Image: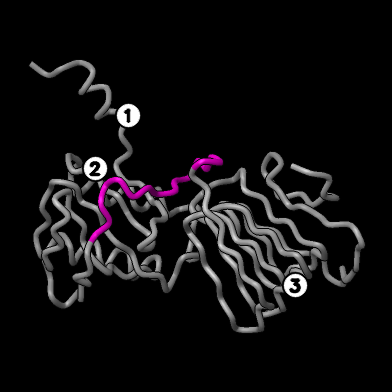
Amino acid sequence: MIDGGTEVKNMLRPVVELKGYRDGLRLIIDPEASMDRIQLAIVDRMANLGNSLAGMGLNIDIGDRSLSDEELTHLSNLLHKNYGLDIKRVIRESDDQTPIAEDLRIIGAPALHQEEHAIDNQFSPEHEETLFLRNTLRSGQVERFLEGNIVILGDVNPGAEVTAAGDIIVLGALRGVAHAGALGNTSSVIIALNLLPTQLRIGRFITRPPAGGKRKRRQAEVARVNGESITVEEFNGL
């Protein structure tokens, strides 16, 4: 007989989760889900992220299940062709990382132990981590931090990109591309002393400045999701 509590817990468990760990981006798979459900869940989970994470390596956490060469290759193709993500390694519940398909070049570095915490879509103060960058980002530079927030003590020049799973704070001019809430957290904000972005993105929402909208303000501004769009207003505290 199936325990009622266990059955409800399994029904509520997401088929896939996307989280930022200290060893990088991790796709966590429900070990009891079928491959068809897993593939559909990946497409659904990535639908609002587009190619914003393209070029990143991805660890797959499969718990106590096993994947055949064919299944792993299929997942690799799905992630790479559609989203530009490459599988770095497979993490099992036992912390074993057995290469299933050599051509995927799964890295054999030790997996994180269960006690090492991750940052999921719902950030809370006790879980937040923050990366401080004490320099200006030049054109062509890309900074990504999927464990929490980014604070930049400098400018983000046109042609530079900054991506964070949490908030982005620029103590200078933001003239490039900024993507906060990159794993889907639409409560994230973008704050800058001079907000002149090429593009702003929070979760799945995207906005661009109006043409010819060059301006310089003496007041810090904050961009946040309001309803179904991103709004910018003077920053008077969160």
Residue 205 within the segment the image draws in magenta: no
The residue tagged 3 is 175
Mark 2 Cα-neighbour bin, 10 Å: few <14, some 14–19, many ≥20: many
Mark closest to the chain's N terminus, 3 or 1:
1
Residue 49 percent location from the top left of the image: 49, 57
Helix or strand or loop: what does disc 2 sit on? loop
Give the quadrant of residue 69.
Answer: bottom left
In the rendered structure, the answer to whether residue 101 lies left or right of residue 228 reads: left
Helix or strand or loop: what does disc 3 sit on? loop
Q: Quadrant of the N terminus?
A: top left
For marks 3 and 1, give the CA distance.
42 Å
Residue type for callout 3: Arg
Q: Is the residue under label 1 in contact with that under label 2 (CB below 8 Å)?
A: no
Residue type for callout 1: Leu
Residue 221 percent location from the top left of the image: 81, 55
In the rendered structure, the answer to whether residue 182 lies left or right of residue 161 reads: left
Q: Quadrant of the C terminus?
A: top right
The residue tagged 1 is 12
Residue 121 percent location from the top left of the image: 48, 45
The residue tagged 2 is 30
Residue 99 in view, yes or no: yes
For marks 2 and 1, give the CA distance.
11 Å
Mark closest to the chain's N terminus, 2 or 1:
1
Name the mark on residue 152. Answer: none
Give the quadrant of residue 2.
Answer: top left
The residue at 40%/70% (across/down) is: 56
Pick the residue in front: 204 or 179. Answer: 179
Mark 3 Cα-neighbour bin, 10 Å: few <14, some 14–19, many ≥20: many
The residue at 13%/50% (across/down) is: 94
Mark closest to the chain's N terminus, 3 or 2:
2
The magenta span reads 111-126
